[in-house]
Structure formats: C-alpha cells, structure tokens
Amino acid sequence: MLNLFPSDATDPANAIWIDLYDPTPDEVQKVEKALSLDIPERKELEEIESSSRLQFEDDVLQLSTPVSAHGDEEGPTPVGFVLTEKALVTIRYTEMHAFEATAHYCNKKAHGLTSSEVFISLVEGMVDYGADMLEEIGVHLNRMSREAFNRYSRPPKRGIKRQTRLLREALVDIGNTGDKLSQIRESMLALQRIAPFVREKAEHWMKEEMQARLKTVERDIKSLADFEVHLSNKVQFLLDAVLGFINTEQNDIFKVLTIASVVGIPPTFIASMYGMNFHDMPEYTWHYGYEWGLFLIVLSTVLPIIWFKMRGWW
C-alpha cells in the first residue's frame, strides 16, 4: 500500500512523506522513479550489521530498525527509513500505532511540514510505544512476583499436581515475558544508534528545533534502557525463584518416597524371614506364633514413622 502525506499530495514527487506499507514491486518502482532513490528490500532491512542499518551517501540517509507490534506473534519486523532534506520514505510490513498517530498529525498540520519533522515524530512515537510496553511488562512482573511468593511459597491445598501445573505455567509466562523484553531491547538499541547518527549527518539542513527534539529522544531512550535492565534483572530473579520452588517441590516428593521405602524395609525383612519355611523355627510351633509375627510387622512399621515424625521429616 502506498500512502502519501500531506493527504493533498497526488504524486510521490510532491509528497513530504511516502509510507510504503507491505509494498508491491510496482509501488516501490513508482517511488524510486519519482524520487530517484533506491528503496531497500525487506532482506536488506533485516541485516543486523550497523553498517547496513545506518547508511549515508549523497545526502541520503538509509536507516532500519526492528520493531515489535501488538498482536504480532512472529516477533519484530523491520522498518526502513530513506530520509532526505525534502522527503521521507518509510518501508514497513505491519500496522503500527506510531505511524497512525503521525499520519493524523501530518494531515492536521499539512502546511509547513518537513521530512525531518515527520521522521522525528515517527521515532518519538516508536519510543513512546516502547515505553508503554515496558510499563506493561513492569506491572505484569510485579503481579507475577506477588503470586510467586504468596501462592507458590505455601503448601498446596489442592494437590501437588495442580501446584506443579501452576509452576509450569508461571515458568512459561516468565519465558514469554523475557522474550518480549529482549525484542524491545533490540528495537531500543537500534533507535539509540539512529538518533545521533541522523543528528550528525543531517546537521546542515535540519532545524535546531528538530535537533533538540532528537537529543530529547536520545535521553528518553537512555532512561528506557536503564529501566529495561532493571526489568531484565527482575525476570532473572523470578526465573530463579520459580525454579527454586520447583526444586523444593521435587525434594518434598523425593522425601515422601524415601520415607515410604525406609518404612517398608523392616516389615518386609520380618515377613521374608518367617517365609523361609525352615523346619526348626520355634515360632511355627507357638500357639500365638501368627499373632507374634503380625505384631512384629506392625511394630516395625509404626516405629520408623514415629521416629520420622519426631525428627520433623514428616
């Protein structure tokens, strides 16, 4: 899809912002012909080297960054920028709130719009989106932390099986949260490199007001990076805590099995001893021989249980 801004622009040649949303080859060719620019393909935008993501040649900036969007199960998708003094071309493959908000702003302002202003508005929107995502993750981690130490630290009331299922669900939830956090970190890292690069290369034609806004973006990204480190540490802490609860639960299960096996040894020994069927065993001729053997089996079972109970193992 080819979108032109301001909305009264009829051709890419007289538009300030050309937004290519999952473009077709014909749309890309049309923009390249109108602006005499090379539009990078998706494969080029997915390159991870800094030299590929940050390019400057003949007063043309080519930039790319991975961005995560709500509801995008496939992870981050690349977003590309081709920025010149007169025009901005964006290439994206998913819907993004920052683009919708900037499009509304461009249509509202219309006159006096510059390519650098549109670019900075998009970057600010992406940073704001990242901040909102980090806030959501922070709230989610706080809730998980309370659940971990209020629910899982107490003995299970509805059986070990349910407790195990809850711990497994918590472990999966922590893993998914850590994955989302790493995606945001990747996006913030790319934007952190883009902002100073653009400010340096476009200094001779970018207004001071726009440069000041870029500096503010850099400060915001730095503060978000610090907050992201804090959240990453919390994810690791919760992961260690849940794994600790799982290990404790497994140890409790092994303890019960160990006690059961130890309790079963003495009566098994007595029963096997009297089951040898030797002729000269005096208990066979006793009137109460059966009761005596049964008494020994019960006694040898009860005594270990009492001992374990006194030791606090059960």
Image (tube, rainbow, N blue to C red):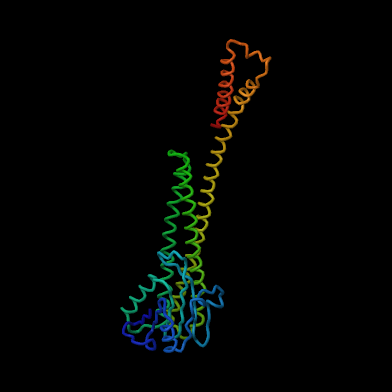
Q: Report the side of 313 relative to 29 (left or right).
A: right
Viewer-proximal residue, 6 or 26? Answer: 26
Residue 111 is situated, as x and y percent measured from the top left of the image, at: 33, 84
Q: Quadrant of residue 29?
A: bottom left
Q: Quadrant of residue 102?
A: bottom left
Check the image and report above or below for 249 versus 296: below
Viewer-proximal residue, 106 or 196? Answer: 106
Residue 266 is situated, as x and y percent measured from the top left of the image, at: 61, 25
Q: Can see residue 227?
A: no
Viewer-proximal residue, 208 or 147? Answer: 147
Query: How many labels were placed on the picture?
Result: 0
Query: Which residue lies at the image location 31% right of the left edge and 85% below the top edge?
Result: 8
**Quadrant of the image containing the N terminus:** bottom left
Q: Report the side of 290 relative to 18 (left or right).
A: right
Check the image and report above or below for 22 versus 87: above
Q: Can see residue 126?
A: yes
Residue 251 is situated, as x and y percent measured from the top left of the image, at: 56, 40
Residue 313 is situated, as x and y percent measured from the top left of the image, at: 56, 32
